[in-house]
């Protein structure tokens, strides 16, 4: 090999090493931003919602803050779980609607969100413990009343992944990712175009050392196989963050009674706001059929 060729090879190796190091550094920055807590001052419930601010201890180790609205003569309770990097305010529209339907409602901030303290967002690991603790809180506050969960994105994932002392009687899960590796890959494709998910390993490898969680456990589709209670899976036909194929995979994996609804034209958005009356009618029918069967 000629000296010139050797020099070019050395230069290419140096450039490749620099690019690799830069990619690792960038991925570490993005990874830490993804799990960074999002504290916000929220305060009392808005007058349009009513109710009271509450706090309770969670299995996640956090003190969970929320809004509880006890409806007079309620015969069931609904726990509302928000998406990643959101907070309980994003579920207030649903809470108002469910109150009008005669349910008790509890909107919470997951750990590391809103007013609930936490070191990291854990993409469902600790948030699942918050979901289980929220169900337990409602059962203690309203003994004997059935409990349903309505969760969107991370909220739906946490609901499916949770280990409950006494599972809720019904679930509505919206825009839920199948597993964390697919979720990260989807977002990289959106950010960098097709092939962006090739960078996914540079992010997923950080999860275990940063969060102390096995990546394979962050899988709503795997957890769905042990959910025996009725589940209503709702998803947008144009969702690129939690794709329709993922929703259908979760639906197929569910062990118990189930329904599925594709909201035509919706992306990864608030499906209640997008579908309005159609959403309210379908969700009301599902919850009434599974939470109020003994009260007719």
Image (cartoon, rainbow, N blue to C red):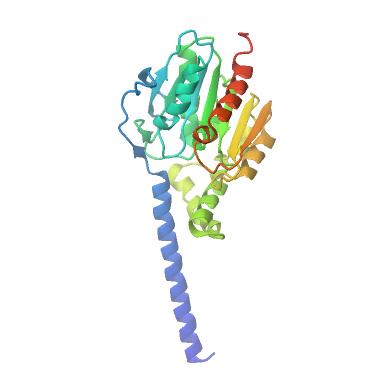
User: Considering only vertical position in the picture, is 200 above or below 216?
Assistant: below
Left or right: 64 in relation to 226: left
Give coordinates of residue 295: x percent, y percent. Answer: 60, 8
User: Considering only vertical position in the picture, is 127 above or below 295?
Assistant: below
Left or right: 55 in relation to 133: left
Q: Quadrant of the N terminus?
A: bottom right
Q: Is residue 205 visible?
A: no
Q: Tell me which residue sits at (43%, 14%) in the image.
A: 70
| Residue with the most extreme bottom position | 2
| Residue with the most extreme front position | 277
Q: Is residue 35 visible?
A: yes
Give coordinates of residue 88: x percent, y percent. Answer: 41, 30
Give coordinates of residue 169: x percent, y percent. Answer: 59, 20
Task: Name which quarter of the figure residue 228 lies in.
Answer: top right
Residue 46 vs residue 117, the one in the foreground: 46
Give coordinates of residue 160: x percent, y percent. Answer: 57, 31
Left or right: 145 in relation to 228: left
Q: Quadrant of the C terminus?
A: top right
Task: Name which quarter of the figure residue 42 lies in.
Answer: top left
Left or right: 249 in relation to 74: right
Residue 213 vs residue 265, the one in the foreground: 265
Q: Tell me which residue sits at (50%, 10%) in the image.
A: 143
Residue 252 vs residue 51, the one in the foreground: 51
């Amino acid at each position: 090999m000629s000296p010139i060729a050797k020099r070019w090879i050395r230069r290419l190796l140096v450039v490749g090493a620099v690019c690799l190091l830069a990619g690792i550094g960038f991925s570490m920055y993005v990874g830490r931003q993804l799990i960074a807590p999002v504290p916000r001052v929220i305060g009392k419930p808005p007058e349009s919602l009513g109710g009271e601010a509450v706090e309770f201890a969670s299995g996640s180790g956090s003190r969970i803050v929320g809004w509880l609205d006890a409806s007079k003569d309620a015969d069931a309770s609904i726990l509302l779980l928000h998406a990643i990097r959101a907070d309980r305010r994003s579920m207030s529209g649903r809470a108002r609607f469910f109150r009008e339907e005669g349910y008790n409602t509890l909107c919470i901030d997951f750990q590391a969100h809103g007013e609930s303290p936490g070191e990291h967002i854990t993409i469902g690991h600790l948030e699942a413990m918050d979901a289980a603790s929220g169900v337990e809180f409602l059962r203690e506050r309203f003994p004997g009343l059935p409990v349903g969960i309505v969760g969107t994105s991370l909220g739906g994932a946490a609901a499916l992944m949770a280990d409950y002392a006494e599972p809720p009687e019904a679930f509505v899960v919206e825009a839920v990712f199948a597993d964390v590796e697919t979720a990260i890959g989807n977002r990289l494709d959106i950010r960098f175009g097709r092939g962006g998910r090739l960078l996914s390993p540079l992010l997923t490898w950080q999860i275990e050392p940063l969060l102390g969680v096995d990546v394979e456990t962050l899988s709503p589709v795997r957890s769905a196989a042990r959910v025996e209670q009725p589940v209503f899976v709702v998803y947008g036909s144009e969702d690129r963050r939690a794709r329709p194929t993922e929703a259908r995979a979760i639906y197929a994996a569910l062990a118990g009674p189930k329904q599925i609804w594709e909201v035509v034209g919706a992306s990864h958005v608030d499906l209640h706001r997008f579908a309005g009356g159609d959403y309210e009618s379908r969700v009301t029918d599902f919850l009434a059929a599974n939470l109020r069967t003994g009260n007719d």
